[in-house]
Image (cartoon, rainbow, N blue to C red):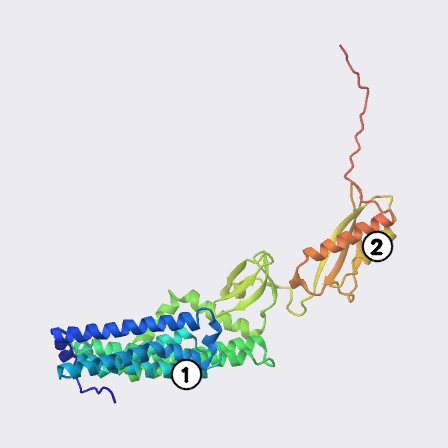
């Protein structure tokens, strides 16, 4: 092994670095690293800048990751041998530099192999670089005893809470363990949620319910595991039970109501993803359902966040509750001298479009004898309302215009008849 934990203490290393010999060794080590850094840049420019696809190849990528630490390691090793040969003394700082570079190369190699072992997109280069840096810094702090000094400093910062004596080391240790356990729980919940969402034979609402219950259960379990690990007695939680209940009764009442309403909506299947809803004169399709709100996307692309409590307490029109097909109509006016039976037949013929259902078939009606003409209305069922009505109505109106022009059915203009009663004398000057 190139370096052991007991080989040099952190305080001794600081003393060496304050001497002219230590500073000279440090300067030599930095020069070696700068030379290696230039070699790494030249290698990247020559092999990877114009060929980014080589990032995905195993051996070229590992070679790129090892250029800097390996070349710097050999340069430092050569410098240390020259130093020992001419001075006859052990180069402790250069020895530390060589150990740091050796372990950096080894950690980079292991992380690069780990990244290649994962499927594409699961472990990116940025994540690999971050993991490499954390492992290397952690190892070197352990090797030179820096962690001992940090732990002693954290233990020196202590304070009392009631009868308990706490210090910063206990608090930091607790935060780290709680964070790790909760992150693992969130990661596991995402895996379970992804599996549940892929179960096509299961109702979509039940998938969402099971996914949310799994996430809540794993988080609660993570907290129950994390608290004893860091030395907190679970009986302490009973002290906060009344406070939490009081908070839910006042400040968190609306949040709790939305949360419970969300589960009721999911379980009773009254609203599902893809349903067409009318809420407060706003029409849209449900694109997402969360524990707090439902996302309603309108035809213009805008998205409204409707609280679950609103869907439970107000009247909601679900236009696709049992059948997603919708009925709509187009008003048309014809002149009084028109053949009404022919006009009604032509309206039905114009509604023969791919998106219009044939069962029930389109139908035409006489709705009003108006001032300027006779009002007719063409009603029909649309099989796919999620694709909108504007284009379909435009096609039907165009077909009506062509058929009426072919069969001489007149669409009247507004007409007004003015009668003058009595004698009108015109005075001219």
**How much space separates mark 2 and mark 1, taking CA atoms?**
71 Å
Name the front one of labels 2 and 1: 1
Residue in the foreground of this view, choosing between 248 and 72: 72
x and y percent of residue 371 in the render?
A: 78, 41
x and y percent of residue 143 in the render?
A: 23, 83
Q: Earlier in the sequence, mark 2 or mark 1?
A: 1
Q: Quadrant of the C terminus?
A: top right
Label 1 sits on residue: 114
Picture quadrant of residue 244: bottom left
In the image, 153: left or right of 317?
Answer: left
* In the image, residue 4 above or below residue 273: below
Label 2 sits on residue: 346
Numbered label attached to residue 247: none
Residue lying farthest to the bottom in this orientation: 1
Picture quadrant of residue 24: bottom left
* In the image, residue 338 above or below residue 266: above
In the image, 322: left or right of 248?
Answer: right
Residue lying farthest to the front in this orientation: 86
Residue lying farthest to the top in this orientation: 429
Q: Secondary structure at mark 1?
A: helix
């Amino acid at each position: 092994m190139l370096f052991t934990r007991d080989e040099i203490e952190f305080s001794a290393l600081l003393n060496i670095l304050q001497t002219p010999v230590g500073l000279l060794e440090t300067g030599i080590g930095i020069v070696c690293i700068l030379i290696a850094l230039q070699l790494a840049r030249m290698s990247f420019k020559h092999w990877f800048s114009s060929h980014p696809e080589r990032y995905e190849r195993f051996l070229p990528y590992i070679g790129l990751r090892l250029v800097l630490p390996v070349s710097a390691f050999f340069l430092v090793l050569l410098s240390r041998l020259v130093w020992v040969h001419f001075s006859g003394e052990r180069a402790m700082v250069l020895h530390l530099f060589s150990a740091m570079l050796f372990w950096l190369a080894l950690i980079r190699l292991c992380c690069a192999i780990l990244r290649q072992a994962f499927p594409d997109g699961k472990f990116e280069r940025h994540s690999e670089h971050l993991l490499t840096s954390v492992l290397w810094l952690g190892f070197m702090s352990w090797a030179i005893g820096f962690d001992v000094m940090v732990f002693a400093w954290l233990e020196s910062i202590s304070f009392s809470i009631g009868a308990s004596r706490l210090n910063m080391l206990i608090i930091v240790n607790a935060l780290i363990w709680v964070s790790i356990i909760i992150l693992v729980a969130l990661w596991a919940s995402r895996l379970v949620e992804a599996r549940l969402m892929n179960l096509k034979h299961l109702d979509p609402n039940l998938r969402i319910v099971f996914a949310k219950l799994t996430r809540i259960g794993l988080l609660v379990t993570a907290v129950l595991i994390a608290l004893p690990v860091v030395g907190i007695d679970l009986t302490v939680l009973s002290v906060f039970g009344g406070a939490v209940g009081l908070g839910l009764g006042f400040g968190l009442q609306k949040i709790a109501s939305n949360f419970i309403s969300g589960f009721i909506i999911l379980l009773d299947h009254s609203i599902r993803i893809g349903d067409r809803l009318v809420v407060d004169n706003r029409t849209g399709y449900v694109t997402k359902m969360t524990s707090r709100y439902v996302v309603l996307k309108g035809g213009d692309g805008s998205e409204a966040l409707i609280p679950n409590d609103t869907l439970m307490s107000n009247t909601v029109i679900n236009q696709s509750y049992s059948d997603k097909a919708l009925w709509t109509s187009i008003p048309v006016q014809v002149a009084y001298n028109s053949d009404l039976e022919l006009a009604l037949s032509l309206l039905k013929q114009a509604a023969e479009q791919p998106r219009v259902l044939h069962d029930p078939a389109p139908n035409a009606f006489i709705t009003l004898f108006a001032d300027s003409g006779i009002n007719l209305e063409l009603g029909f069922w649309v099989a796919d309302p999620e694709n909108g009505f504007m284009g379909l109505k435009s096609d039907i109106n165009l077909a009506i215009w062509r058929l009426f022009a072919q069969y001489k059915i007149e669409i009247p203009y507004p007409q007004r008849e003015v009668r003058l009663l009595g004698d009108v004398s015109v005075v001219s000057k």
